[in-house]
Image (cartoon, rainbow, N blue to C red):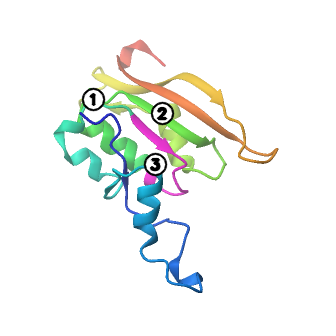
Amino acid sequence: FEYVLAYDDYSSLPMNPHIYAYPVGDLRDEVEASFYPHVRRGSHVDAFKDASNEGRILLMVYPPPGPMAIETVRAYMVQSAQNDTLVYVGEGRGGANADNAFFDFLEGCTVEVEENTSSPRTVWVLQHLLDLAPFGHDKGFERMFVFRRTVQNASDGN
């Protein structure tokens, strides 16, 4: 049993081998071997195609701006009702990570389990918030957010 199932499509790898004056080989393989050797190549939703990944905690660290973060959370939710814990590491709303749609979704998630209004709905509840020390400088707005997914009846209110 692997506790960590890391996925990356390597599209945002910051090191471009073409900028070096000497041959460096495949930097993706070097990066993979130096950080965590078991990174699975795949998109942000590929992890949720395997049923053995159900019931795990979703850890998203510094997702890029754009829809990737919300697409990942939605795929996580659709895969299984057991997928109920999200750990997000990055800047908050208006920062360098994710986008407003992601934060809107977490703040007001009203995904209906069924069509009628009396059916249960999924909400994300912030369980923990931790300020993180900035990397090598005095500026930094990174935090770790731990959310728990709960289901409540629409009649329960907010």
Q: Is residue 59 magenta?
A: yes
**Picture disc at residue 55:** 1
Q: Is residue 139 above or below residue 43?
A: above
The CA distance from mark 3 to mark 1 is 19 Å
Query: Where residue 59 sits: x, y (%)?
Result: 44, 38
Query: Where residue 115 sits: x, y (%)?
Result: 24, 32
Q: Is residue 115 magenta?
A: no
**SS for dot 2:** strand
Horizontal relation, residue 89 to residue 51: left or right: right
Q: Is residue 49 above or below residue 51?
A: below
Horizontal relation, residue 70 to residue 50: left or right: right
Outermost residue on the top side: it is 156
Query: Where residue 68 sits: x, y (%)?
Result: 44, 54
Q: Residue at x 53, y 40 (%)?
A: 104
Give amino acid for label 1: Gly
Query: Circle 2 is placed at which residue position?
Result: 87
Q: Residue at x 51, y 28 (%)?
A: 146
- Give whichever of discs 1 and 2 has the lower sequence position: 1
Q: Residue at x 55, y 70 (%)?
A: 15
**Quarter occupied by residue 133:** top right
Give amino acid for label 2: Val
Task: Tell me the crowding category of disc 1: few under 14, some 14 to 19, or many 20 or more residues within 10 angstroms, Cα based.
Answer: some
Horizontal relation, residue 115 to residue 138: left or right: left
For the residues labelled 1 and 2, say whether their Cβ atoms are less than 8 Å apart.
no
Outermost residue on the bottom side: it is 21
In this rendering, the label closer to the viewer, 3 or 2: 2
- Give whichever of discs 3 and 1 has the lower sequence position: 1
Task: Tell me the crowding category of disc 3: few under 14, some 14 to 19, or many 20 or more residues within 10 angstroms, Cα based.
Answer: many
Q: Which region shows up in magenta?
A: 58-68
**SS for dot 1:** loop
Query: Circle 3 is placed at which residue position?
Result: 69
Query: Where residue 52 sits: x, y (%)?
Result: 19, 37
